[in-house]
Amino acid sequence: MGTQSTVFGQVLKLVPRYEFDRLAADHHKGRKLRSMTRWKQFVALALGQLAGRHSLRDIETNLAAQGGRLYHLGAGKVARSSLARVNEEQPYALYEALFARLYERCARLAPRHGFRFANKLYSLDASLIDLSLKVFPWAHYALGKAAVKLHVGLDHDGCLPAFANVTAGRMSDMDGARAMAFPKGSIVVYDKGYSAFAWHKSLIERGIFFVTRARGNILCEVVARHKTWDMAGVEADETIRLTGLRARPHDLPDLRRVVWRDAETNKRYVFLTSIFHLDAATIAGIYKARWQVELFFKWIKQNLRIKAFLGTTSNAILTQIWVALCVALVIAYAKFLSRTELSAQAVLRLLQLNLFLSRDLTALIRGQPPDTEITDRRQAVFAL
């Protein structure tokens, strides 16, 4: 009799098991795990993310209710005490490494960004994940507040989180950005919070282009003025040389300043960039695309479990955040495989409603009815 794996089982197959086991061996701490393996941990936490489970007991009950289906997931029943112990003791670095592997797989299928230039485009930003100071005193960062900070470099090819870093809430955005190794020739766009002359110089020396908002108090002299060719919204396009006391020690090369006015809001923007091979309207378009990283933070906070946590230690918190990032990439990978126009949120909703049904994953995402998934009706008949 032909059988169809559950939707959740097909989602887990998108994570190469042999790579996972190898990474688990590389990031193991202490004595050998017996019944509670790292794969079981991942299955339980991934279920918590996809199904919106709120607690360890909730995950334990949900898995136990599936009975025989757990065998096909390569897992079994999970005790909440065992899950809590592994979350606290086993290094979160396993899921940080898994995140990098999953991004590589997603990037091969991701559609290109909507611009004509061939350069890779990344948006850089950071967002606080609020915690309770009473429950997480180790995460204190301000008066009466606790938080960790998620730093993300978003790849505009598919809007994927290509680089991620989770730090203490008090760490500056710039410290998180310096840990990201953007490839040579790429374009990085960020807001004024990253406008440091040393950072600009570092990017230029590594062959990386940048686009940012210019600070209002920037001191410079105009070296050349370029024609705007009546481009919509572009008021000025200039080559400038920084002359301020803070800029002089860094010996920055000449930069480009683009002044653009939004026709809808009539608001005026001044951009600073090291790009000279693209027109001024494209520079404005690149900065406008930076909003995608803000939408990513909004999506992951609203749809995945990174605001209510299953543990109280630093390792447990980081484990849950990194698993959430891995699940976000798995959802994107399923979306790319299905070649659907649905949003990531719509794909997640489909998965949530059908996790333990025997449906073909691709057909489900494409919206095909269930009976079109069986090519031979004899597979549905039990015959001796």
Image (cartoon, grey):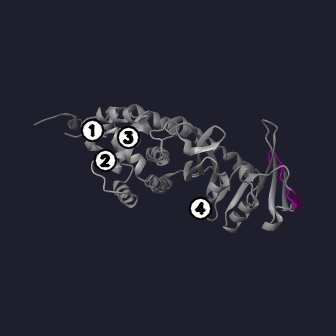
Q: Which residue is mark 2?
A: 36
Nearest the camera: 140 or 166? Answer: 140
Q: Which one is closest to the eye, mark 3 or mark 1?
A: 1
Q: Is residue 1 left or right of residue 257?
A: left
Q: Is residue 41 visible?
A: yes
- Looking at the rendered structure, the kind of residue marked 4 is Ala
Q: Secondary structure at mark 3?
A: helix
Which quarter of the rendering shows the N terminus? top left
Mark 3 vs 1, N-terminal side? 1
Q: Secondary structure at mark 2?
A: loop
For the point 60% across and 60% down, the residue is 182
Q: Which one is closest to the eye, mark 3 or mark 4?
A: 4
- Looking at the rendered structure, the kind of residue marked 1 is Arg
User: How many C-alpha atoms fall within 10 Å of the one at disc 3: few (<14), some, or many (≥20)?
Assistant: many
- Looking at the rendered structure, the kind of residue marked 3 is Leu
Which numbered dot is residue 135? none
Question: How far separated are the C-alphas under marks 3 and 1?
Answer: 16 Å
Mark 4 vs 1, N-terminal side? 1
Which numbered dot is residue 69? 1
Question: How far separated are the C-alphas under marks 4 and 2?
Answer: 35 Å
Q: Is residue 306 left or right of residue 23?
A: right
Q: Secondary structure at mark 1?
A: helix
Residue 281: percent from left, percent from top: 76, 50
Q: Is residue 155 visible?
A: no
Q: Which one is closest to the eye, mark 4 or mark 2?
A: 2
Q: Which residue is mark 3?
A: 361
Mark 4 vs 2, N-terminal side? 2
Q: What residue span does the magenta drawing correspond to?
A: 219-235
Which quarter of the rendering shows the C terminus? top left
Q: Are marks 3 and 4 in contact (CB under 8 Å)?
A: no
Residue 311: percent from left, percent from top: 45, 41
